[in-house]
Amino acid sequence: MADLVITAANVTPGTATGISNNDNAGTANGTITAGESLFLDSVSGQLKLAKADTLADAAFVGISLHAALAGQPIKYRTNGALNLGAILTVGQWYVVSPTNAGGIAPLADLTAGNFGTVIGYALTTSQLIINPIASGVAHG
């Protein structure tokens, strides 16, 4: 499989019965596009694109809700419903991409050495329910 193909212009906050939405804000450490997975860099205190290749980079905090350049404020969804602007497989679990920084991939894409961080699951073909679980361990 491959990372989701996200249309940034179609990323919007979602709603789902019984699901609370939580957003946060921070400062971008580089160029960020709507719909990218983020982690908080402990050194700079800024948001960077998440990737499952190292433990630090896989420490997912949310999905960007809009674009930002380095040094600009960025709002991101930490949990809840999000219209991702991509075609999702209902019931599929999605993780921080092991291939592309900021990417979102199906769970099956994790291979040996990747740090498994679940982002959430597809409620519909367009809506992701963000419910992060950071394992903190490399896939075997």
Image (cartoon, grey):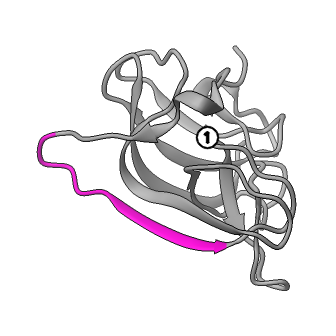
Name the residue: 12% across, 41% down.
Answer: 17
In the rendered image, the quadrant that contains the N terminus is top right
Please identify the quarter of the rendering in which residue 29 is found: bottom right
Name the residue: 53% across, 34% down.
Answer: 94
Please tell me which residue lies in front, 54 or 83. Answer: 83
Please tell me which residue lies in front, 21 or 132. Answer: 21
Name the residue: 23% across, 57% down.
Answer: 20
Q: How many marks?
A: 1
Name the residue: 83% across, 58% down.
Answer: 54
Range shown magenta? 17-26
Residue 26: give x, y in percent of width and height: 64, 75
Is 93 left or right of 57, judged from the image as shown? left
Q: Is residue 117 above or below residue 25?
A: above
Please identify the quarter of the rendering in which residue 135 is found: bottom right
Please identify the quarter of the rendering in which residue 89 is found: top left
- Asked if residue 61 lies in the magenta stretch, the reply is no
Amino acid carrying mark 1 in the image: Gly
For disc 1, the neighbor class at 10 Å (few under 14, some 14 to 19, many from 20) is: many
The residue that label 1 is drawn on is 35
* Furthest residue toward left: 18
Q: Is residue 108 above or below residue 16?
A: above
In the rendered image, the quadrant that contains the C terminus is top right
Is 77 left or right of 7, judged from the image as shown? left
Residue 123: give x, y in percent of width and height: 31, 28
Residue 113: give x, y in percent of width and height: 82, 45
Q: Secondary structure at mark 1?
A: loop
- Asked if residue 19 lies in the magenta stretch, the reply is yes
